[in-house]
Image (cartoon, rainbow, N blue to C red):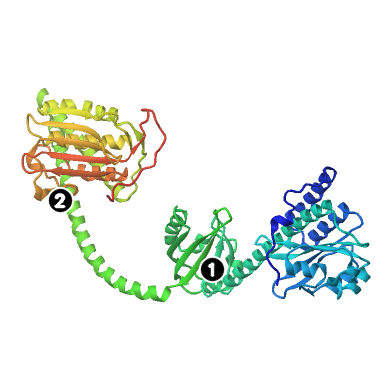
Amino acid sequence: MPREFDRRASLGVGQEAPAEAIPQLLVHHAQVLEMMAEGAALHAVLDAVTGALEDLLPGTKCSVLLLDERSGRLHHGAAPSMPLEYVELIDGMDTGPCAGSCGTAAYTAVPVVVSDIHESALWDDFRPAAAIAGVRACWSTPIPGKDGQVLGTFAVYHDIPHTPSEHERHLVDRFTHLAAVAIDHDRLFGSLAQSEERFRRAFDDNAAGMALLGLDGRVLRVNRALCTLLQTDASGLVGRFFQDLVQADDRPSLLHGVAAEGGDTHRFELRFNRLHDGPIVTSTTYSGVRDAYGNIVSWCVNLVDETGRKAAEEERRARAEAEIAQRHAEENSRTKSQFLTALGHEIRTPLHAVVGFGELLRSGSLTVERRQEALERMSSAAHHLVALVDDLRDVAAIEARALRLHTEPLPVGPLLTDVHGLLVAGAQEAQVTFDVVLADAAPAAVCDERRLRQVLLNLATNAIKYNRPGGRVVLSAEHRADGLLDLVVTDDGPGIPKHLQHRLFVPFDRLGAERTKNPGSGLGLHVTKGLVDGMGGRLAIESGAAGGGTVARVTLPTAEPVSEDASDTAPTPDLRAE
């Protein structure tokens, strides 16, 4: 069997070719490398290698034999100048300790030089073949692979007795190395072809439905099992976007999951439409196919039919959900009736004021002072109705998840100052001190400026309205250790009883009706919470026992500090689940 070969020895380490031979040597090397890069067949590349050495060493004939690892025999690789009869005679020759120059070199893994074939015992069995080729000397060098194993032999023949010079040895070493590169290159592509064939068989014959997708999600290839599963043929699937085969309700989770970072394997439960029967439920796995640089270049998708099992689960779930839905429907019906009753009462009160004072004005019996008072009352009622309609519109948008917000980094200092300026006069009239406290270098909040102003006005107005004479309200900004920003409205009023705090965000539930002459519509906190949620923030209201005051805390995501005219939109983390 062939032994390991010292590749450094074959490369002529420490040797140099004569200066006049170097340009021509480089030209031949470049030509051979170009052929390999263009995918030329191995026999053509080896013909070029042997032909190049014959060109550099006039009067020589060169050949390459390739070693079959399984049989241990040498087979024809290249011999452009040797007679065909000679090539056929030595094709398939055994290796051994006395098997000519090439068979012995392959067996011993060391170069074998036979200066005169007529006098060498190595050629006893091959002298008739040498006579056919008209050669008298043969020097054979084993061709080493990357793993040190012999790939074949590189032979140089002379038609007269001859011993190679140092220059000849150096050239043969160089071209032996070039032949080794060519053979390794061919074997690598052969291994790739075998790997592709194994993949093809595993893909085509797999019992699970399989598809190969491009990075854009377009189907490149499908197997028979997938065609059977979806009741179509390959022509109905190849070229289509895979997500188009999935039922519409499942597409968002598929697209979001595949686009998510972290890992190259994703699992989904997806429903697919079939050509004839109803939809099927599948357990679907996406696996990234990576290139040599670690980049995902395509997706391999496996589908396993789960329709039967899921149908049984769905039936059990449907029965349970039907019972729950019935209870919810009854509860929602009661809630809707209560909501409409409260809404009707809330609208009737200001409308009665408008109608009543309108009748008085039309009678013409009012004094100037009473007329002015009636107009002010009508204006107040009208403003109340407008505010109620605005709140109802916001409630509808929040419930429908259609609230339009434009979030961007916003310095909060000017906004807090603005809110203070709008409410300070009303606070003074209510005999309440209203202050603003800003933290040093408060970061910019990611929010909708108009909606955040609405939130702070609502919270601060409540804190002033339900405070006591001589009380204090503080609006502040606090930068948290976790990088978030708290906007806090604190008051030292009577607080909210604990048994009522769970009703803070219930529409039309006016908890402070008994503490003020104008308790409001009962929609303010419900709308405020919806606005904060919509901006990706969190609203918390805490209140102690009687006299303990109330703290309303709006927590928002932050961005790097920006100038007041900043307009770039920053990503907004969702804090609502915290």
Towards the viewer: 394 or 454: 454
Residue shown at 24% from the left, 67% from the top: 324
Towards the viewer: 420 or 276: 420
Residue 296 visible: yes
According to the picture, the residue beneath numbered tag 2 turns out to be 502
Mark toward the viewer: 2 or 1: 1
Q: Quadrant of residue 71?
A: bottom right
Q: Amino acid at mark 2?
A: His
> Residue 49: image x %, image y %?
81, 57
Q: Earlier in the sequence, mark 2 or mark 1?
A: 1
Marks 2 and 1, how far apart at CA: 53 Å
Q: Amino acid at mark 1?
A: Met
According to the picture, the residue beneath numbered tag 1 turns out to be 210
Q: Quadrant for the N terminus, please.
A: bottom right
Element under disc 2:
helix
> Residue 77: image x %, image y %?
80, 66
> Residue 203: image x %, image y %?
57, 70
Towards the viewer: 218 or 232: 218
Q: Quadrant of residue 567?
A: top left
